[in-house]
Image (cartoon, rainbow, N blue to C red):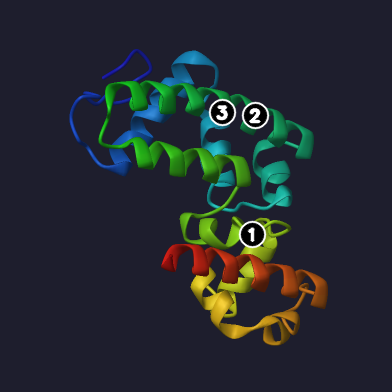
Amino acid sequence: VGERGIPLVDIGDPIGAAGYLMEFQALLELVAFDRQRVRALLDWAEEASFDHMEGVYGLGPGDVHQLTTTADWLIYAMESISRFLDHPLLDNVRTLRQRVRLGIKEDALEVASIPGIGRVRARIFIEAGYRTLDDIARTGPEPLSNLQGIGTTLAKRAWEFASLALSRRSE
């Protein structure tokens, strides 16, 4: 147990994603953040709205940006160390970094990789049943343009991006 009562886990032990998140939480608290900011960051990565961030944590959009920018820097350092050590959880660190940057749940990362698709639009695609680039590539732009908040231009771009990604995978 660390100074602040946070359980510490041996980094050399393949502990799984939950344990790695605990290590990350302990690192953030030790280096730069108090517990409330860590909870805010974790809420953000679970798609908490700006209203929630303001109401619960008193953080406006600029504060959230500053918080995620600092966390991104720390996670980048973890990623570099993990890569250097050839740590088995390197992919988990990369996933965490993307989630913190975008404020998005893991299930939406693939859809959010499409240019012009952020956390809100990714969730629209997912709730409509388009969970992967394959789903988007196989449907065509017209059905996508019927989704709330997705116009014809964005639908076409999303379909083209997904189709190109699918064709590259099959090569």
Lower position in the chain sequence, tag 1 or tag 3 = 3
CA gap, disc 3 to disc 2? 5 Å
x and y, in percent, of residue 165 in the image:
54, 63
Residue pictured at 35% horizontal, 27% vertical:
83
Q: CA distance from mark 1 to mark 3?
A: 23 Å
Q: Give the label on residue 102, or none.
A: none
Q: How many marks?
A: 3
Which mark, residue 114? 1
On-image quarter of the N terminus: top left
Residue drawn at (73%, 68%), measured in percent from left and top?
A: 157
Secondary structure state at the residue bearing disc 1: loop
* Residue with the mark numbered 3: 71
Tell me where residue 75 appears, x and y as whole percent. 49, 28
Q: Quadrant of residue 111?
A: bottom right
- Above or below 37: residue 153: below
Numbered disc in front, either 1 or 3: 1
Disc 2, SS: helix
Position of 15 with respect to 161 (left or right) is left
Provide the residue designation for mark 2.
Answer: 69
Q: Which residue is at 53% across, 68% downward? A: 133
Looking at the figure, which quarter contains the C terminus? bottom left
